[in-house]
Image (cartoon, rainbow, N blue to C red):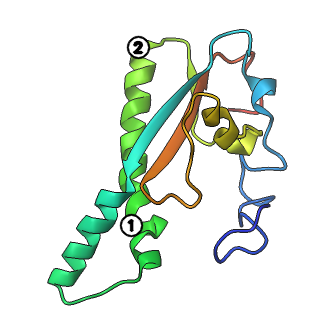
Amino acid sequence: MKPYYNHPKGCPNFGKKQGCPPTAPLYEQIYNLAQPVYAIINEFDMTSHVEQLNEKLKAKGKEWSEHQLRCVLYWQPKARKQLEQHITGFLRDHPGYSVERCPEAMGVDITETLAHVEINLEWPPLTVAYQVALAGIRKVELFGR
């Protein structure tokens, strides 16, 4: 519910989208924390993305603001595809593991968690946009997940 650009009330999915708070289960309710939990991290190069998009637009005679160049609509699909490739590789090498693509919805503070391993997230992302999924061993099948 933390406000961010153009969303003064926080995430518009709160209380509306399945798998989002406040109805999403907590990570520890679903996953066995006595087993290893892995972070699958995609580092998306925002600097290169902005430079390449800006060059492409200038070649067409268009000029966008910095905010437009960094809009999630233009970088997130590519970054999500990269994350999915990382997840596929992880699952191939770790049978029995399940992956949560939005652990924040399950109460995990990804910013604080990554800070413990000296990965400091930028808010908003300026040079690198990190996408993080968590992989763990489920306790039991609950909530149809």
Residue lying at 43% horizontally and 69% vertically, measured from the top left: 70
Q: Which mark is residue 28?
A: none
Q: Residues within 10 Å of mark 2 (few under 14, many from 20)?
A: few
Instruction: Tell me the residue that label 2 is attached to.
Output: 93
Task: Point out the image quarter for the C terminus.
Answer: top right
Farthest front residue in view? 118
Image x and y of residue 98, in percent:
58, 23
Q: Is residue 80 left or right of residue 139?
A: left
Callouts 2 and 1 close, C-beta under 8 Å: no
Q: Is residue 14 left or right of residue 128?
A: right
Query: What residue is drawn where x is 72% and y is 50%?
Result: 18
Answer above or below: position of 138 versus 4: above
Q: Which residue is mark 1?
A: 74
- In the depicted structure, whether residue 132 falls above or below residue 62: above
In percent of width and height, residue 81 lies at 37, 46
Question: Which sits earlier in the primary sequence, circle 2 or circle 1?
Answer: 1
**Residue drawn where x is 48% and y is 35% of the image:** 41
Q: Amino acid at mark 1?
A: Tyr
Q: Residues within 10 Å of mark 1 (few under 14, many from 20)?
A: some
52 is higher (above) or lower (below) than 78: below
**Residue 22 seen in render:** yes
